[in-house]
């Protein structure tokens, strides 16, 4: 991190950027400074710039699983948009190295065209590969940890590390990266060669299930609450009669009780109050403590 000529990254930085423009929820206050970076060198420069100016750093991906508070984010927000992709095809399997900023859905289309299978269950998840690793995203019985070989990341001093699957401490909606000690750069996946028509059929089936059950037509951060072992959280919320319940512009989805949606220009405060109300109702009725799956960032 020796180079102190920040002219290139300063050209990319945006002051007073509304974070609602960078979240699937379409909610969020102002970031003091915002930059989208496309390379490791840019990332190193951005971090050094923030350090030299004594600014806190917040890392985001595509903003699909976060709620930014109404007061916004102090310091520098860095959006990881590293999109490298390398496919090494073998006889029966393929090794895919993919940048953290690569979006999950376009990636699944690329795999389909390459006739590579094993990603179909995850194909409809919004967000980026980096975000998926960060929270060990999953759907339909598969988690990203099931296909990860290793992940390369950087610490806040610019040092690069590669961690094996086991070292990443994957569990339900969790990885070691939640400690925010490292920034994910790329990951290496093991997938299997398949037939295009079979892969497409599976992808279509999973996408249709999503469309049928999830409120994809309204801004949200995906599933709002974590499931608990042996308990379907959305079912408990539904049985509390909370579908359609609103606080301000935030609403428990009529389609899927596990989703909180931005129904009408919701604020982060609306969403947080609704999350608390849902938790309270479920605990009072069933004695079960549920917790949000959404990552809440920004000044409280």
Image (tube, rainbow, N blue to C red):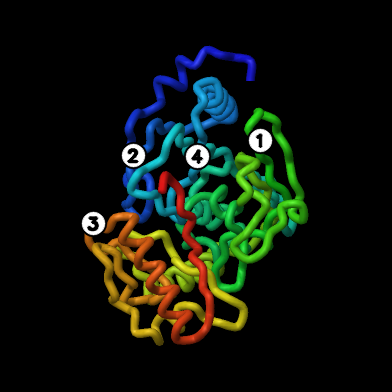
Horizontal relation, residue 87 to residue 222: left or right: right
Cα separation between marks 4 and 2: 13 Å
Query: Which residue matches tag 4?
Result: 58
Query: Which residue matches tag 3?
Result: 265
Q: Position of residue 247 (x, y in %)?
A: 27, 67
Classed neighbour count for the residue bearing mark 4: other residues with Cα under 10 Å, few (<14), some (14–19), many (≥20):
some
Q: Extreme left residue here? A: 264
Cα separation between marks 3 and 1: 37 Å
- Give the residue displayed 58% in from the left and 57% down from the top: 135
Q: Are marks 4 and 2 in contact (CB under 8 Å)?
A: no
- Give the residue displayed 39% in from the left and 76% down from the top: 257
Horizontal relation, residue 187 to residue 220: left or right: right
Of pointers 4 and 1, the one earlier in the residue sequence:
4
Q: Position of residue 252 (x, y in %)?
A: 34, 72
Query: Which residue matches tag 1?
Result: 155
Q: Position of residue 268 (x, y in %)?
A: 34, 55
- Give the residue displayed 36% in from the left and 29% down from the top: 14
Cα separation between marks 3 and 4: 24 Å
In depth, the one of 222 and 212 nearer the eye is 222
In depth, the one of 140 and 108 nearer the eye is 140
Query: Which residue matches tag 2?
Result: 30
In this rendering, is residue 295 above or below 287? above
The answer to whether one can see residue 73 in this image is yes
Classed neighbour count for the residue bearing mark 3: other residues with Cα under 10 Å, few (<14), some (14–19), many (≥20):
some
């Amino acid at each position: 991190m020796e180079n102190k000529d920040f002219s290139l990254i300063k050209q990319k930085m945006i002051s007073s950027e509304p974070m609602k423009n960078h979240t699937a929820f379409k909610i969020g206050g102002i970031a003091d400074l915002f930059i989208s970076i496309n390379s490791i060198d840019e990332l190193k420069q951005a971090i050094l710039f923030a350090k030299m100016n004594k600014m806190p750093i917040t890392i985001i991906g595509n903003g699909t699983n976060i709620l930014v508070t109404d007061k916004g984010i102090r310091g520098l927000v860095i959006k990881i948009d590293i999109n490298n992709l390398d496919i090494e095809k073998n006889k029966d399997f393929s090794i895919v190295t993919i940048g953290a900023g690569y979006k999950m859905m376009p990636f699944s289309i690329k795999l389909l065209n390459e006739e590579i299978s094993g990603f179909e269950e995850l194909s409809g998840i919004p967000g980026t590969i980096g975000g998926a690793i960060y929270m060990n995203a999953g759907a339909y019985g598969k988690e990203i940890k099931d296909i990860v070989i290793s992940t390369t990341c950087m610490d806040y001093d610019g040092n690069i590390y590669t961690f094996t699957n086991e070292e990443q401490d994957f569990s339900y909606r969790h990885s070691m990266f939640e400690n925010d000690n490292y920034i994910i750069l790329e990951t290496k996946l093991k997938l299997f060669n398949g037939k295009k028509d079979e892969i497409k059929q599976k992808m279509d089936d999973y996408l249709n299930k999503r469309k049928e059950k999830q409120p994809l037509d309204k801004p949200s951060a995906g599933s709002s609450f974590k499931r608990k072992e042996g308990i379907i959280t959305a079912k408990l919320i539904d049985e509390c009669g909370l579908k359609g319940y609103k606080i301000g512009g935030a609403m428990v989805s009529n389609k899927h009780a596990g989703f909180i949606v931005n129904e009408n220009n919701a604020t982060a405060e609306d969403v947080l109050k609704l999350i608390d109300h849902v938790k309270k109702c479920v605990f009072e009725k069933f004695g079960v403590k549920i917790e949000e799956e959404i990552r809440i960032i920004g000044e409280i």
